[in-house]
Image: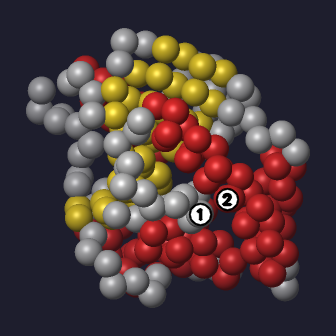
Amino acid sequence: MKVCFVTDEYAHDDFPNTGGIGIFLKNLSVALSKDDIEVYVLGFNKKNKKYKYKNLTIETFNLGWIEYVDILIKKIQNRKNLDWITKCLCQIYLRAIASKVKKHAIKYNIDIIEFNDYMGFSSFVEKSERYKIIIRLHGSKTVLDRIYKRRVNKAIEYFEQKAILNADLIIAVSEFAKKEALTSFDINSKIEVCYNGVNNEE
């Protein structure tokens, strides 16, 4: 079994400080690798680096000029009346990520590709008989904006919903995360709840 986690957060000494998703992914990827599962972490943190451990490979990449698109998205995503520009920029950025993920999946014969729900990173990843796409609901930008009563960017909401609908399996980290996703998005998908990514009783 070969599993790939696609992320912009991962707890590692050479990477920027991370929040819950990055720590969660590190714990999960290390635990799976100890069970003789080949684990790949594909990260986009603007650097081209590769780290190889026993059954764990961490590879980060730089998208070249596309990285400036990401910077623009972050600058304008909360500004009123600019959602249409955000949508155009997100399409460019997310398609570039999808292309990179597809090449990675083919190169390493990946069976499962997992994304988190933030920003809709898997929106344009093509479904394939080669692999299954999993979305793990930690709390998307749309969900968090609604919880904290911030303005919801309709473009980002669109891509986050598109990513969820594109998944073969949807996992939520809690009943609350599941409920908020069903409330925030126009989806009728089955969502499994998995509280712990690893066995915390060992």
**At 45% across and 69% down in the image, what residue appears?**
166
Residue 198 horizontal/vertical position (percent): 23, 37
Q: Which picture quadrant has residue 202?
A: top left
Left or right of 67, for residue 135: left
Q: Residue 180 carries which label?
A: none
Asked whether residue 77 appears in the rendered view, the answer is no
- Picture residue at 47% right of the left edge, 22% below the top: 57
Q: Which amino acid does label 2 sit on?
A: Leu
Q: Do the residues labelled 2 and 1 touch (CB within 8 Å)?
A: yes
| Measured Cα–Cα span from mark 2 to mark 1 | 7 Å
The residue under the point 80% across, 66% down is 89
Horizontal arrangement in the rendering, residue 16 relative to residue 40 (left or right): right
Quadrant hosting residue 63? top right
The disc, 2 or 1, on the residue closer to the chain's N-terminal end is 2
Picture layout, residue 166 above or below residue 101: below
Mark 1: secondary structure:
loop
Q: Which residue is drawn at 80% across and 72% down?
A: 88
Q: Look at the image and name its color scheme.
A: secondary structure
Q: What residue type is labelled 1?
A: Phe
**Residue found at the very far left of the displayed protein:** 201
Q: Nearer the viewer, residue 113 or 177?
A: 113
Q: Quadrant of the N terminus?
A: top left
Figure check: 18 above or below 72 = above
Label 2: which residue?
94
Query: Residue 167 in the image: x percent, y percent?
Result: 40, 65
